[in-house]
Image: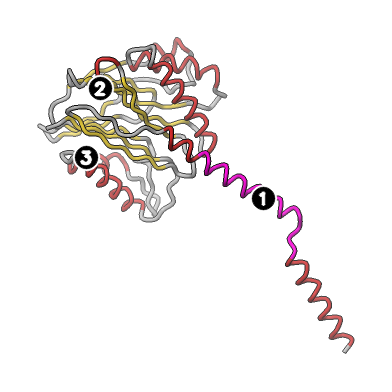
């Protein structure tokens, strides 16, 4: 009987120890909860920074933004210029989570500030590079594709700071043409080196033509067998769906990406902006 009491007493002590969490674990749980709340606040702030679709006569637009976690380093923007021109950009800041999001906020603020005093994509990106070069630690950078749409002339003037190529669908030929003007990433090269490398390109647009800007989270999206979505699939989708209005075209692309992902965890932010000239 005595042995039985001892065994039961021992079991009671073990059970009692498991029920009461050590103070250290309570502190970790509280810190994790606070961090989760902070991330949720950051997510809401970041979403408020992203602009709605612009309204430009003779054009329709749509966009898609989905960070890999609560906050992301991707961003897009629409910037009004004089003469009815519209600046359109997609960017990707290095780093994930909060680090990428903080860099995204700084880069966005710099671009908007420089867009108020510069008149071309090349000038704006060169000015932003000067600022970021002073602020960023080694290994941090931002990639941006900046396109300036002039609806009165039906032209698109582009500059690219190390970002993915823009895809342009030509309706008349049903042809997808990549455009990737030469340029270095922002925040990594000296002012002289950056200015010497970046070039600006202007193209004419025809009725029904469509452009697509995107971050590398699109072609690099993995499926469960670690196969990337890739540029070939993206161009194939564009040829088949570019004739639609922008909203249904975007929904089609999102569905195509989700089918490829097939439940695989998204490892990188995804940002897409598309616009179509009225046919």
Q: CA distance from mark 3 to mark 1?
A: 48 Å
Q: Is residue 125 magenta?
A: no
Q: Is residue 157 left or right of residue 226?
A: left
Image position, residue 192 (x, y; %): 45, 10
Image quarter where the C terminus lies is top left
Q: Residue at x 40, y 50 (%)?
A: 226
Check residue 97 in the rendering and tell me which mark sits there, or answer none.
none
Dominant secondary-structure state across the stretch colored magenta: helix
Mark 1 Cα shell of 10 Å, populated few (<14), some (14-19), many (≥20): few
Name the residue tied to disc 2.
149
Q: Is residue 5 above or below residue 155?
A: below
Q: Residue at x 49, y 21 (%)?
A: 188
Image position, residue 54 (x, y; %): 28, 30
Name the residue tied to disc 1.
30
> Which mark is first along the chain, 1 or 3?
1
Of tags 2 and 3, which is closer to the observer?
A: 2
Mark 3 Cα shell of 10 Å, populated few (<14), some (14-19), many (≥20): many
Which residues are drawn in magenta? 20-42
Of tags 1 and 2, which is closer to the observer?
A: 1
Q: CA distance from mark 2 to mark 3?
A: 20 Å
**Residue 83: quadrant of the picture:** top left
Name the residue tied to disc 3.
238
Q: Residue at x 48, y 36 (%)?
A: 45
């Amino acid at each position: 009987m005595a042995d039985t009491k001892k065994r039961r007493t021992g079991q009671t002590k073990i059970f009692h120890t498991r029920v009461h969490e050590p103070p250290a674990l309570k502190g970790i749980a509280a810190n994790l909860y606070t961090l989760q709340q902070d991330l949720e606040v950051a997510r809401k702030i970041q979403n408020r920074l992203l602009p709605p679709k612009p309204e430009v006569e003779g054009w329709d637009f749509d966009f898609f933004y989905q960070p890999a976690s609560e906050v992301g380093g991707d961003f897009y923007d629409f910037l009004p210029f004089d003469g009815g021109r519209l600046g359109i950009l997609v960017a990707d800041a290095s780093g994930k989570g909060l680090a990428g999001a903080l860099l995204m906020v700084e880069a966005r603020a710099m671009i908007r500030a420089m867009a108020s005093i510069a008149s071309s994509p090349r000038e704006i990106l060169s000015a932003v590079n000067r600022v970021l070069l002073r602020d960023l630690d080694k290994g941090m950078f931002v990639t941006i594709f900046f396109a300036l749409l002039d609806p009165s002339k039906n032209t698109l003037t582009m500059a690219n700071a190390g970002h993915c190529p823009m895809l342009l669908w030509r309706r008349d030929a049903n042809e997808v043409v990549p455009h990737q003007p030469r340029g270095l990433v922002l925040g990594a090269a000296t002012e002289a080196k950056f200015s010497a490398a970046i070039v600006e390109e202007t193209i004419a647009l025809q009725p029904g033509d469509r452009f697509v800007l995107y971050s590398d989270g699109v072609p690099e999206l993995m499926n469960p067998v670690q196969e990337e979505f890739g540029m070939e699939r993206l161009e194939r989708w564009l040829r088949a769906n570019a004739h639609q209005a922008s909203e249904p075209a975007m929904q089609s692309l999102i569905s195509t990406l989700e089918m490829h992902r097939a439940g695989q965890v998204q490892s990188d932010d995804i940002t897409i902006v598309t616009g179509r000239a009225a046919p």
